[in-house]
Amino acid sequence: MKVLEDKIRTYGRALSDDVLLVDMFLNHQIDCELMREMGAEFARLFRDERVDRVVTVEASGIAPALMTALELRVPLVVLKKSASVINQGALQTEVFSFTKQKSYLLTLKPEYMPAGERVLLIDDFLANGEAALGAARLIEQAGGVVAGIGIVISKNYMPGLQRLRDAGYNVSALAQISAMGQGYVRFVGEEG
Ligand code: G4P
């Protein structure tokens, strides 16, 4: 998605091959118009999947997921990462974040995931795929069907995208980074 790649080129800052700072428009200050455009694009990409519900992981997935759910006119469910009072009777799965080097319990109340519904999972970054695989596990544990996975920024040189596709999921990413290092970002199609 060109508008997103342009934002990353203009305002993103690659600190290393691990971390791309996008806090100017995605996860600290939020560019609402960009979120609207991304929601429309996710809705277009997954239009044929008969999506009943959008699911995301807190916190940075919420903005693009909300705009996608609005566009598709379906409910949005946010998987929780922090221990909280909702844990009683909730489904949980452990996820290890390589980027942050820590584990957390992803949590879902089953009443917000009716069995048989088709789910579009939206998240901000895809690196190793742990968060997306954990979210898919929870959705499926509750009886939902993962109809698609939409990612804002995929670091394609990391294993996440391949792992999700190998697991059989229909994955689309709006910006796909083929290489990144301190001070540079290269998108798929720009190699050479
Ligand atoms: P994985 O799920 O694909 O395995 O990735 P990993 O655990 O390594 O990273 C997930 C967390 O790290 C997410 O944040 C994600 O937003 C963040 N992250 C991954 N790569 C980048 C990056 O290049 N830049 C930035 N800014 N963040 C990155 P989270 O723990 O879910 O926190 P939140 O920000 O959503 O609250």
Image: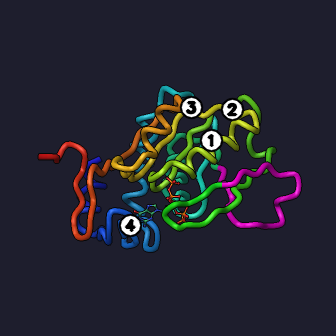
- List the residue tagged with mark 1: 136
Q: Secondary structure at mark 1?
A: helix
What type is the residue that disc 2 sits on? Glu
Which mark's residue is nearer the viewer, 4 or 1?
4
Q: Is mark 1 within 8 Å of ligand 1?
A: no
**Horizontal side of residue 136 vs 150, given as left or right:** right
Say how many tags the image has: 4
> Looking at the image, is mark 4 or mark 2 earlier in the sequence?
4
> Looking at the image, is mark 3 or mark 4 earlier in the sequence?
4
What type is the residue that disc 3 sits on? Ala
Q: Residues within 10 Å of mark 1 (few under 14, many from 20)?
A: many
Mark 4–mark 2 distance (CA, rounded to whole Å): 34 Å
Q: Nearer the viewer, residue 45 or 136?
A: 136
Mark 3–mark 2 distance (CA, rounded to whole Å): 9 Å
Which mark's residue is nearer the viewer, 2 or 1?
1
Q: Name the spot of residue 35 as percent of width and height, x first.
A: 42, 57
* Residue found at x 43% / y 68%: 30
Mark 4–mark 1 distance (CA, rounded to whole Å): 24 Å
- List the residue tagged with mark 2: 117
Q: Secondary structure at mark 3?
A: strand
Q: How is the image coloured?
A: rainbow
Magenta region: which residues? 77-94
- List the residue tagged with mark 4: 19
Q: Is mark 4 within 8 Å of ligand 1?
A: yes
